[in-house]
Image: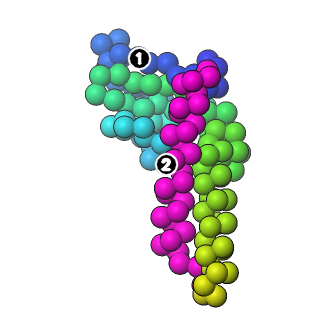
Amino acid sequence: MDDEKEIRISKETLDELSEDFEETSLGDPMGARRQFRSKEDGAHVREYDDNFTVHIDRADPRKRPLQHLLLDSPETLGALFCANLLSHREERASDSRTNPLGFLASFLFLNYLFRDLKRILRFLFF
């Protein structure tokens, strides 16, 4: 399976996953009810009401989190970098310490924005 492709499996075809998968909170749920990861490899499964989607991560975030961010979720690193720049810029401008809530809010907003942009670009060009 291509690194950027997902396959969709109807629950009429597969009603439940094997014991080789464990539930996880790691990953963008993208509206899924639950997420699972293979115990053996980088398979990431999202469960929706009527289907499962499956894709293979290039790096398993449980075993190689930094490599996973670099290869599979660079938008998260971009959001961290930009939120850090914004919070330090604010700190210099106000001569005060960085507000952790401001950093967190910036990161969450930017991460959401960058993930949506990634989805749009994939839709348009791939």
Does the rendering let one see residue 65?
no
Magenta residues span 97-126
Q: Does the magenta segment cover residue 114?
A: yes
Disc 1 residue type (three-letter): Ile
Q: Residue at x 56, y 45 (%)?
A: 114
Disc 2 residue type (three-letter): Tyr
Per the model, the C-alpha gap separating discs 2 and 1 is 26 Å
29 to the left or right of 61: left
Q: Does the magenta segment cover residue 30?
A: no
Task: Look at the picture and state if 87 lies above or below 24.
Answer: below
Q: Which mark is residue 112?
A: 2
Quadrant assignment, res 80: bottom right
Q: Which mark is residue 9?
A: 1
Q: Position of residue 47 (x, y in %)?
A: 37, 30
Q: Position of residue 37 (x, y in %)?
A: 50, 36
Q: Position of residue 63 (x, y in %)?
A: 64, 46
In this rendered view, identify the residue nearer to me: 46 or 125. Answer: 125
In this rendered view, identify the residue nearer to me: 121 or 36. Answer: 121
Tell me the element at label 2. helix
Q: Which numbered disc flags the more N-terminal residue, 2 or 1?
A: 1
